[in-house]
Amino acid sequence: MAVYFTSDLHIGHRSICKYRDRFKDADEHHEYMINKILELSKRDILFIIGDFLFDGPDYFKHIEKLKNKKCRIKLVLGNHDAKELYYEDIFEIQLPLFNYKSMWVSHCPIHPQELRNRAGCIHGHLHSESVKKREYDIIDDCEHLVPDPRYFNVNIEDNNYEFVKLETIKEYFEN
């Protein structure tokens, strides 16, 4: 059994290739993302922490494909997710902010003062190739940025279009 985290798959986003030029078109992008999920085994758990599946003309087509998944999907709804996802019985809906293995999990990174006694915050939402897995605290009215290793961004594009294993995240926070 393996536990994975990801976010911001943006399945159903019709203009996604404007931001992800590695794919020739939106259909190729959506197929890739769905196939990544279908590759997981029945013993795997995938946390998708926001911006998973957009509402649109292909919503039900994507849901039909996802019904063939073997893994458990624990889903935190993000700011771009279809509201219908809440009613789909093939996903386990999670709270918008919850504690998992002494780490906060949320779609958006939480304020540094709220980290308290947790190892860090696993999140998505931020899209930036340059940031990678280190997020930034804003100081001096946004003029200066300092790395903050208490955050781990599991955004799919910032992780080479791969899901991130829980062990990788735990090792990151331990160092």
Image (cartoon, helix red, strand yellow):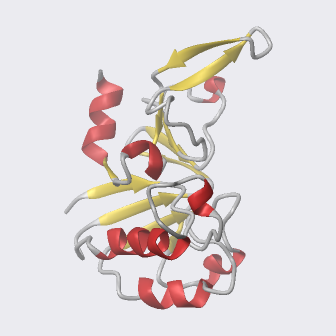
- On the rendered structure, is 121 left or right of 14? left
**Residue 73 position within the rendered picture, expressed as x and y whole percent measured from the top left:** 42, 70
Residue shown at the point (41%, 38%) measured from the top left: 102
Answer with the quarter of the image where residue 81 lies: bottom right
**Residue 169 position within the rendered picture, expressed as x and y whole percent measured from the top left:** 33, 38
Q: Is residue 76 above or below residue 165?
A: below
Answer with the quarter of the image where residue 59 lies: bottom right
Query: Count the marks: how many?
Result: 0
Answer with the quarter of the image where residue 67 lies: bottom left
Taking the view exactly as shown, the residue that stands out farthest to the front is 24
Residue shown at the point (52%, 70%) measured from the top left: 25
Residue shown at the point (55%, 65%) measured from the top left: 52
Taking the view exactly as shown, the residue that stands out farthest to the right is 141
Tell me the quarter of the image containing the N terminus. bottom left
- On the rendered structure, is 170 left or right of 111? left
Tell me the quarter of the image containing the C terminus. top left
- On the rendered structure, is 84 left or right of 75? right
Residue 51 appears in the rendering: no
Residue shown at the point (51%, 84%) measured from the top left: 62
Residue 101 or 35: which is nearer the viewer? 35
